[in-house]
């Protein structure tokens, strides 16, 4: 299985990035390959000028096309997801696929409608984390999650992993052509 991870924080040090890193480690322990992208790594001009032919945008699109799942984490600014993330999502084709508790609904009311417009096949329950639930690690120490947040994240990742496992695998186009050509009926 392949998962694309997309971090929506423009900051190098990011609590949403910590959540993605925890999710990545958990998925890798389940044998899932995870490819990481951060909005801050995309050339700003490519995003602001909607350069669909940008090598990094093309690479992201190709990875998403091959992926079994997409994980997105974003900080919440002014009750919505990051504008940097929005600029990346604006470059995805249609079928591609917070600071305080007051922002908890931003995932459901701001981000999910955008993902729905991109024709996401299935959207699982989002995870919201308050700043106080994530402690940055000092030096080489890993960041720590509050036990309640870690439990919610683990449960969500288990659902995510199960959802990817039950997705039907697409038929090889060559196999489909062979079946149609050798069929004794017509469409």
Image (cartoon, helix red, strand yellow):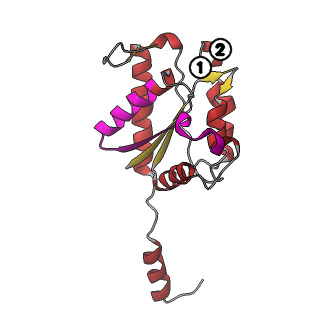
- Residue 25 appears anywhere in the view: yes
Q: Which residues are magenta?
A: 18-46
The residue depicted at 67 percent of the width and 31 percent of the height is: 83
The residue where tag 1 is placed is: 98
Q: In the picture shown, does residue 157 fall above or below 152?
A: below
Q: Quadrant of residue 31?
A: top left
Q: Which residue is mark 2?
A: 102
Q: Position of residue 77 (x, y in %)?
A: 66, 21
**Distance of label 2 from label 1 (alpha carbons):** 8 Å
The spot of residue 111 in percent (x, y) is 64, 34
Crowding around mark 2 (Cα neighbors within 10 Å: few <14, some 14 to 19, many 20+) is: few
Q: Which mark is residue 180?
A: none
Pointers 2 and 1 in contact (CB under 8 A)? yes
> Which residue is located at x 62 percent, y 29 percent?
107
Q: Nearer the viewer, mark 2 or mark 1?
A: 1
Above or below, comparing residue 48 to residue 185 in the picture: above
Percent x, y of residue 93: 64, 53
Q: Residue furthest top?
A: 132
- Which secondary structure lies at badge 1? loop
């Amino acid at each position: 299985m392949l998962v694309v991870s997309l971090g929506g924080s423009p900051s190098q040090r990011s609590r949403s990035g910590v959540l993605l890193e925890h999710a990545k480690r958990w998925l890798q322990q389940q044998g899932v390959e995870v490819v990481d992208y951060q909005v801050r790594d995309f050339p700003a001009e490519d995003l602001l000028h909607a350069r669909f032919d940008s090598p990094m945008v093309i690479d992201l699109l190709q990875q998403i096309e091959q992926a079994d799942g997409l994980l997105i984490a974003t900080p919440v600014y002014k009750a919505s997801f990051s504008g940097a993330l929005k600029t990346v999502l604006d470059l995805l084709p249609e079928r591609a696929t917070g600071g305080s508790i007051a922002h908890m609904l931003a995932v459901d009311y701001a981000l999910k409608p955008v993902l729905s417009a991109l024709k996401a096949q299935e959207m699982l329950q989002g995870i919201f984390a308050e700043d106080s639930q994530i402690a940055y690690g000092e030096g080489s120490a890993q960041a720590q999650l509050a036990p309640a947040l870690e439990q919610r994240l683990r449960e969500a990742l288990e659902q995510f992993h199960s959802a990817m496992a039950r997705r039907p695998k697409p038929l090889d186009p060559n196999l489909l052509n062979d079946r149609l050509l050798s069929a004794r009926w017509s469409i």
